[in-house]
Amino acid sequence: MRALVLKAAKSPLVLEELPDPRPGPGEVLLRVRACAVCRTDLHVVDGELPDPRLPLVPGHQIVGEVLDEAPAPGEGPRFARGARVGVPWLGWTCGACAHCRAGRENLCDRARFTGYQIDGGYAELAVADARFCFPVPAGFPDLSAAPLLCAGLIGYRTLRMAGDAERIGIYGFGAAAHIVAQVARFEGRRIFGFVRPGDEAARAFALSMGAEWAGASSDAPPEELDAALIFAPAGELVPAALRAVRKGGAVVCGGIHMSDIPSFPYSLLWGERALRSVANLTRRDGEEFLALAPRVPVRTEVNVYPLEAANEALDDLRHGRFSGAAVLVPGRARRKGREAAWTAGSALR
């Protein structure tokens, strides 16, 4: 199979021919139909997340077709051949530690993650633990479904951490934000978008996603927020968000990596404001969100790249050259420039 391989941090991915993987007990073999590109992939490639398994095939927002399954001893297959399944970031947990037993498998100290310790979806084929795969909702094409598997799931968990907040500020209007904004609006919440100063395209995108106001991350919103969700990996946004939320409000950091948070006066936190992070996801998050997404219905803006253009997609993400999400598609012909499409329901729009 063809795959993009990370040989060393801070180096470009290398397109290689690798032996076809074979599923072990409890695993499924998938033909990759689409794999969305996540900022976490960028953190792995850029060396901001420590100790990835090298060499590594990145990618953890996989939509794949089941080619084969090797059931665990004493169990039957979980999926039929030809079934369409999604593979998320959380790829394996021990099931025995205190976190796992308490329903917090996202905090398992022995957890392994797709595209980090487990080869991922920047390839034509992939193997995954069947227990950590989700059936993909029938109404979502491959391109539309792929960003749901991390941008959607992490955005959903981040929103849940904000409780019943009505006025939601979203800092960083990328893949996760453009999905969670739709969920929040569906639930009757009000959205305020924050983007890089001077980025008028991102500001317009936030407004198109249902934000009633959008401005620079350094701006004060027109009214106090009940909660703020931070998806941009910029630590300096934390004090700004604390300034924007009311007493008793919450600031929730949805990223796996963030630059250092600068010192700030205690007065910003005082008033029973809460500051918390989101770590990974649970299978329950996946089940809940993928049941909710068709009801909204969530639509995703995707920028499509052929598999061999993964480095280009990562660089475009690094420099904020597109709105929405990037999706790699094995076997897709290279075209001049990028292709952007809204995907929802059963067809491209």
Image (tube, grey):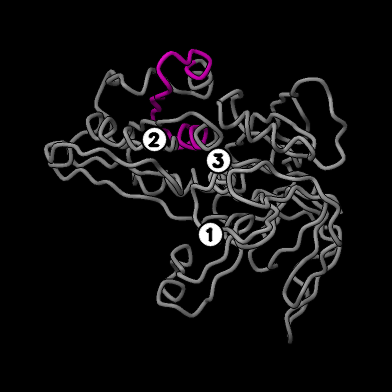
The quadrant of the image that shows the C terminus is top right
- Residue 202, above or below 256: above
Q: Residue at x 78, y 32 (%)?
A: 347
Q: Position of residue 283 (x, y in %)?
A: 55, 61
Q: Position of residue 18 (x, y in %)?
A: 84, 57
- Is residue 117 positioned above or below 177 on the image? below
Q: Earlier in the sequence, mark 2 or mark 3?
A: 3
For this rendering, which residue is in front, 191 or 201? 201
Q: Secondary structure at mark 1?
A: loop
Q: In this orientation, which residue lies closer to the viewer: 83 or 270?
A: 270
Residue position marked by numbered label 1 in the rendering: 51
What's the residue at 33%, 34% (across, down)? 166
Q: Is residue 104 above or below residue 13?
A: below
Choose the circle earlier in sequence order: 1 or 3.
3
- On the image, numbered disc 3 is attached to which residue? 39
Q: Could you say which is closer to the camera, residue 188 or residue 95?
A: 95
Magenta-colored stretch includes residue 187: yes
Q: Residues within 10 Å of mark 3 (few under 14, many from 20)?
A: many
Q: For the residues carrying marks 1 and 3, which lies nearer the camera in this image?
A: 1
- Queried whether the magenta region covers residue 194, the answer comes back as yes
Q: Which disc, if any, is residue 234? A: 2
Tell me how far mark 2 sits from mark 3, CA to CA: 13 Å
**As shown in the figure, which amino acid type bears the numbered disc 3?**
Arg
Mark 2 crowdedness (10 Å alpha carbons): few <14, some 14-19, many ≥20: some
Label 1 is placed on what type of residue?
Answer: Asp
Query: Which kind of residue does numbered mark 2 sit on?
Result: Ala
- Disc 2 to disc 3: CB gap under 8 Å: no
